[in-house]
Amino acid sequence: MKAILWDMDGTLVNTEHLWGQATYGMARAMGRELTPEVRAETIGGTMPGTIRICARFAGLPIDDAMIATWTLWMRETMCELLSAGISFRPQVPQLLAEAQAAGIPMALVTNTTRYLTDVALTSMEKVIGKNAFAFTLCGDEVCAGKPSPEIYLEASRRLGFSPDECLVIEDSGNGMRAAHAAGCRVLGVPVEENTVVPESVTTLSDLYPQHTDLTNFTVADLELIYEQLGQSGKTPTGRGTIDGVSESKNFDSLFAELQKKAADRPEGSGTVRALDNGVHFQGKKIVEEAGEVWLAAEYQSDDELAEEISQLIYWLQVVMVGRGLTPEDIYRHL
């Protein structure tokens, strides 16, 4: 374990209930109370993604102006909630201090915007100081936030390590999917009842059934967990290759190559099988047909189209990881 990458909301600090309060309030203002199941879809997602989920649920039209209006609403609401004070998850300050003393570099990697992350950091730094993290990386500082792996790939690159040398600690399904697709070793520490943990990810309670949080854990325990994750077979190891696709330079030819190799694919995760049958993700159906991939959807704005493209690229990565490949293999051939 060369580095630790921490998610923020729900992992480092007890803020998921604040995001829930704001999200339920926004949906109510839009005209329809969220169900717990729809709220669960927003956990760990981007702010634009959360707004779209709530707007679709309320039956509202979506465009750039609407996204901007509700982004400002969420920003003001969350700024007020975060400024009132936040608390750390159990054992987190001790683990941060111990890792820092041991010289293990750490980064905070969150889908939260830079503005709100800085508000939260102002409160956090009263306890952990200003130098706990080598850097913080936010959802609005990358092209695509979680569940795209981009943010974790960028974080590991900045630290100078391969993704597999990094332990990621995440509470949300979106975050776990992002870190796993990036090739990191992922420890899931879900706190919300409705969290859907990807089949590919090991949780703390999988390893230690009597534990639901990191109380009494040490950095030595995290190093042991990192080794256990490497032995579990659930995290990509970076050794996969595709024979015969070195000349594949575009999206369609790459997917066609994957189709040819479908018969050789081992029984994969539910996400891989689901993609083969067509996947519903945030109300959009992703369809694989005749060697091509297309989205059965109409877009209200360029921003919405860009987000859906990022999700499509994510699912491509899921398929390739299911075939024993790493994100580096993907980017080399796109």
Image: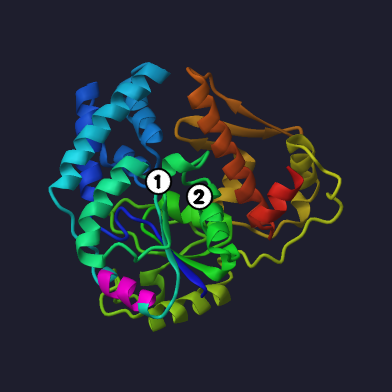
Badge 1 vs badge 2, beta-carbon distance below 8 Å: yes
The alpha-carbon separation of the residues under discs 1 and 2 comes to 9 Å
Residue that mark 1 sits on: 111
Establish if 81 lies above or below 213.
above
Residue 236 falls left or right of residue 243: left
Picture quarter with the C terminus: top right
Q: Seen in the image, is 317 located left or right of residue 261?
A: left
The extreme front residue here reads: 130
Q: Is residue 98 magenta?
A: yes
* Residue 151 disc label: 2
Residue at (58%, 64%) from the top-left corner? 160
What type is the residue that disc 1 sits on?
A: Asn
Instruction: Specify the amino acid type for callout 2.
Output: Ile
Report whether 198 appears left or right of 9: right
Query: Can residue 62 be seen in this snapshot?
Result: no
Q: Is residue 251 left or right of residue 123?
A: right
Q: Earlier in the sequence, mark 1 or mark 2?
A: 1
Q: Residue 194, image x and y in percent? A: 31, 50
Specify whether residue 230 is painted magenta.
Answer: no
Residue at the spot x=39%, y=42% of the render?
Answer: 45
Secondary structure character of the magenta stretch overall: helix
